[in-house]
Each structure stands twice: as C-alpha cells, then as structure tokens.
Image (cartoon, helix red, strand yellow):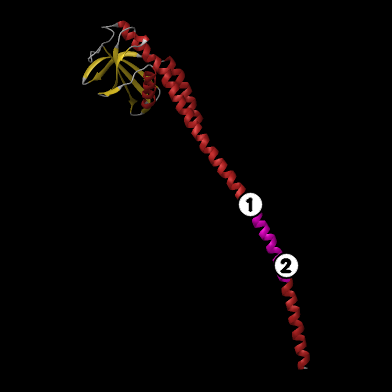
Amino acid sequence: MRNFTLLLSVLFFGVSALAQSTEGTASYNKKTYPATISELPYPPDVVETAVKQEMKKRGYSGKNNKGYTEYKGVRLKELGSESVDLYVKTERKGRKDKDATILTILTAKGAENFIGRSADGALAEGVKQFANSLHPLAGDHALELEIGSQEELIRKAERKFQGLQSDSVALEKKKLQLEQSMAENKTAIQKQGEEVELQRKVLETLRTKRRKEND
C-alpha cells in the first residue's frame, strides 16, 4: 500500500508539472477580486509548506491576513520590475478531496489595491507563471514527505528485526541451558533409580534375614 501511495505521488508530480494556473476571482474581506487559481493534487499543508519554503528562499516571509498569507513588497523576476503584495491561500478542494488543494493568489499594488489582467496584463501573466512554478515544488515536497515516511517505516522495521534477532539469541541460550538441565536431570534420574534398586535389595536382604530368625 505504501509503495502504491509513493507511486501516486510520483505520478502526481508529473501531473502537477504540466498543470496550468487559471484566472478567476476570490473573496477577501467579504469582497470579490481578480485572482490566480491553481488546483494541485496534494494536501493543503504540503502546498502551503512548499510555498513558504520557496518564498523564504527568495527572501520573503509572510504574515496571516484574513485567511491569506500576505507577502509585502515582493519583487520577483516573473513579475517584472514592480514591487507588489501577494496574498496566498491554500485550502482543501472539497470535503472528500482532502488530498487536493486550491491555491489562490491575489495581487495588489499597495494598500489592498487588488488588480487583475484588465489593469495589468503583463503582471497577471507573470503571477500565473509564478503560480505554475509552485506546482513542481509542491510535488518535490510531497515526494520528500513520502520518502521520509518510508525511511521511518524502514527504521521501525529494522528496530523490530534487531529486537527479534536479540530475542533469538536469548531463546537459543535458554534452549541450551534447558537441554543441559534436561541432560543433568536424566543422569540424576538414572542414578536415583539405581539407588532405589540398591536400597530395595538391602531391604529384601533384611526381610529374608528376619524370616530365618523367626524360623
């Protein structure tokens, strides 16, 4: 089952690399704004971690803001020369799709001034490019989690194997001790049986003597 899960992760990695972000709308602070939206075949926490790692790698840390992670003053090569604010949200696709994530990115030019393609087509295309670049990164992170999980399973299996080996050595030692005790007991039984026979003969001799005396 584990190998099957790992295989799915590898296959999903290939799918995510080919997946494309789309333009749509998303709600922020009870209002609707243009957004870049992606669907990824990984749990929300996996995607969120992958995004945060990539943003940290690029020199940015975010803060929570009304359900989004806000990255202020972002300058990325995909976005051109302008500085923008990115609002990123990862959420489960649906109740039954716990392993699928909807990634939403809002783009603002300061003070929650959210914009879309109609305001800046080049920037909107750059955000899509950036969002698409996150797909294989999420796949990488998911695969690393699977590898880490598999490594832990192996460590547990090895510990159990070593424990069984130790038990085998201890049981073998007990077996030898038991065999030695059985051999000693067998010898003792034989000697005690001979002693019983000897004492019976002595008794028989005494009884015979008593009868002769009575005669």
Amino acid at dot 2: Gln
Residue 210, quarter of the rendered image: bottom right
Q: Main secondary structure of the magenta part?
A: helix
**Structural crowding at the residue carrying mark 1, measured as other residues with C-alpha within 10 Å and reported as few (<14), some (14–19) or many (≥20):** few
Q: Which residue is mark 1?
A: 173
Q: Secondary structure at mark 2?
A: helix
x then y, percent, for residue 51? 37, 20
Front label number (1 vs 2): 1
**Structural crowding at the residue carrying mark 2, measured as other residues with C-alpha within 10 Å and reported as few (<14), some (14–19) or many (≥20):** few
Q: In the current view of this chain or complex, which residue is farthest to the left? A: 30
Whether residue 13 appears in magenta in the rendering, the answer is no
* Disc nearer the start of the sequence (1/2): 1
Above or below: residue 116 compared with residue 178:
above
Q: Are marks 1 and 2 in contact (CB under 8 Å)?
A: no
Rendered residue at 55%/38% (across/down): 158
Q: Which residue is mark 2?
A: 190
